[in-house]
Image (cartoon, helix red, strand yellow):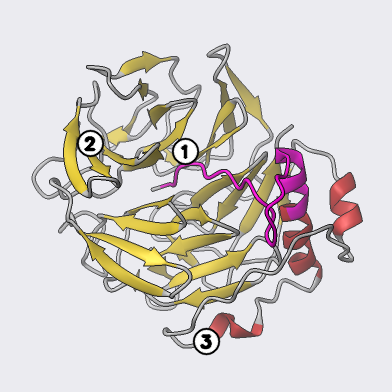
Amino acid sequence: MTASKHRMGRSCGGGRRLSARAVACAVLAALALAACSGGQPASNSRASATHRASVPAKVGHPAKPCSAAVARASSGRWKALAPAPLSRTEVAAAVVGDAVYVVGGFDARTAASTRKVERVDLCTGRWSLVHPISAALNHMGVASYGGSLYVLGGYLPRTDTNSEATARFWRYEPHTDRWSAMPSAPTPRAAFAIAVLGHRLYAAGGRNDSVLALRTVDVFDFARHRWSRAPSLEVGREHVAGMAAAGAVYVLGGRVAGVNLAAVERYVPGGDRWQELPPLPLARSGFGAAATPGRITVVGGEGPAGTIREVDALDLASGAWRRLAPMGTPRHGLGVVSIGSVILAIEGGPTPGLSYSRTVQRLLIR
């Protein structure tokens, strides 16, 4: 449900390297600019389904009306940004180059899952629609690799959230605004963890029509263009979150038979098993996770009391969890991505079940 971390190691328009703080400030400036414009998406955000993605503008040294205020903004607190064009839940998101892509999920206007894909330009803060994926999906996994967007699995029925999981796999090329089919995975799955580490994509846990809490882990090798199997999770679960960080793949939380789990597991490629790590401070499912320098942060989700406001971060050096600033608008089924030291929480449901939002919030961690 959520995407692995993508490091943006170049400026939007050139080849010079930017520090994580410089990238964060540039992103915040652009997104704040959109917020200061009244939260209106770009005029092409309501274009037809075949609209081509715009070419990112250069970041350089942003001289926007809100840039100075954003640069001086204190870290550690969530800030509301310009809302997304669509109101959705059960989406998935990933960073590709200089943009964030938000895929599928349930659309508030139809109460059904959608083929639509939104793109927010990290250099300008402007939203647009790109070419839709070929199948309406919810509870799918989204990741990026080599400048392309990859979408795996999910549920195919447009109004169902727990049947007909698929093993289909797609690639989106931003420079052509076109989708293509990839080799299907060995295991149909939805509500699973997805991460890219090195030249491999990992799909772990989730559920399908036969198994309500999968332990299996499928691995796609981008270089060899084929699937294989990694060691299974110690704890099978669905509605999990996952990402890659510090040379390992992490799977966190989730639930089994409606009961939330706090389990955290780590896999180092080449190993023969997953390692158990300190559990989440708060058991959660239907949430997102993102890696920032030296940390893994879990955001949102739902529990017996409703959607979860608390935000927790795992220090990868010490192995200790600490509580961060709570979300202003807690949500489940949201897209969570990181760019440098910035975390973005996109769309998702503010109450359990099929609720929707256009909410976009950011957290700067220093």
Name the quadrant containing residue 198: top left
Residue 104 visible, this angle: no
The residue at 44%/26% (across/down) is 247
Separation of disc 2 and disc 1 at Cα? 17 Å
- Amino acid type at circle 2 is Ala
Answer with mark 2 or mark 1, whichever residue precedes in sequence.
Answer: 2
Q: Looking at the picture, which amino acid does disc 3 mark?
A: Ala
Q: Residue at x 90, y 45 (%)?
A: 72
Q: Please say if 210 is above or below 215.
A: below
| SS at mark 3 in the image | loop
Q: Position of residue 112 (x, y in %)?
A: 33, 71
- What residue does disc 2 label? 257
Q: Is residue 312 magenta?
A: no
**Percent position (x, y) of residue 140?**
32, 55
Q: Write the residue at 41% across / 77% down.
A: 131
Q: Main secondary structure of the magenta part?
A: loop
Instruction: Name the residue that disc number 1 marks.
Output: 305
Q: Which residue is mark 3?
A: 47
Residue 325 in view (yes/no)? yes
Q: Is 231 on the left or on the right of 80, as rendered?
A: left
Q: Contact (CB < 8 A) between labels 2 and 1?
A: no
Q: Which residues are magenta?
A: 2-26
**In front: label 2 or label 3:** 3
